[in-house]
Amino acid sequence: MPREIFGDVVNPVPKLGSQSRYTLPLSIAAHAAAAAVIVIVPLMATDVVPTPRTVVGAFTAGAELPEPPPPPAARAGAVKNEPTPMPASVAPSVAPGAISAEPETTGHILGDPNGVVGGLPNGTVGGTGLLPDVPSIPEPPPPPGPLRVGGRIKEPQKLRHVPPLYPAIAQQAGVEGKVIVEAIIGTDGRVREARVVVSKPLLDDAALSAVRQWVFTPTLLNGVPVPVIMTVTVQFRLN
């Protein structure tokens, strides 16, 4: 009895009933059919899937492209690119048919009086017919200021002497002596200015009046006359 109860557990024996034999194949077939429906049906329904618009069509649809601008009109009076004429000094590439006489030139021929403006007569210099650049003569420097006698500046010699007039009031007062005057001798040897350095009362004006009439030799410095400053003495003596 126990063997019969636990016999199926110890020695299991598969039993195929009428339904278990067709269950597995039917299940596989059902899954395959469902998969086919899911995959194939959307592919066959092309009219349902919307056609995507292209990017270019999305931007250009309903928009018109502007027309290109017309070419700029030719400006009035525009300079045309004409060939530059060759100078006369360049030899022509084609031999001329005849030789023409050369034109006459002025200002470069010997003996031409109508030469360059400002040139020399006959347009010749030294027989070459060319006008060289003549350097401008520098102006002489202005004479220097008065130089004091001494060293290289020699004392000028007196050429004209005018004795002073003794004032009567000085004679009556018995005044005598010497007056020292500083004088500026010009380039012509004449006294330009004079002033009293050592004074003697009642005699100064007479001394200045006499010195202003004296004349000396011009003083030269490097061969050029220059004004000089020197002192002279005017003596007054009672007889």
Image: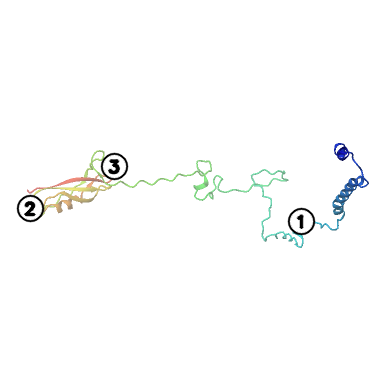
Q: Is disc 1 placed on a helix, strand or loop?
A: helix
- The answer to whether 77 appears left or right of 56 in the picture is left
User: Foreground: 224 or 111?
Assistant: 224
Q: Which amino acid lies under the numbered mark 2 shown in the image of this protein? A: Gln
Most extreme residue toward the front is 1
Q: Which residue is mark 1?
A: 56
Crowding at dot 2, Cα within 10 Å, few <14 / some 14-19 / many 20+, comes out as: some
- Describe the element under mark 3 as helix, strand or loop: strand
Q: Is residue 190 above or below residue 74?
A: above
Q: Please name the residue that numbered disc 2 is placed on.
A: 171
The answer to whether 25 appears left or right of 201 in the picture is right
How far separated are the C-alphas under marks 2 and 3?
A: 41 Å
Q: Secondary structure at mark 2?
A: helix
Q: Position of residue 177 (x, y in %)?
A: 10, 47
Q: Amino acid at mark 1?
A: Val
Which quarter of the rendering shows the N terminus? top right
Q: Is residue 49 above or below residue 183?
A: below
Side of 153 where 89 appears, left or right: right
The residue that mark 3 highlights is 220
Kindly check if marks 3 and 1 are in contact, taking CB atoms under 8 A apart as contact: no
Q: CA distance from mark 1 to mark 2?
A: 136 Å
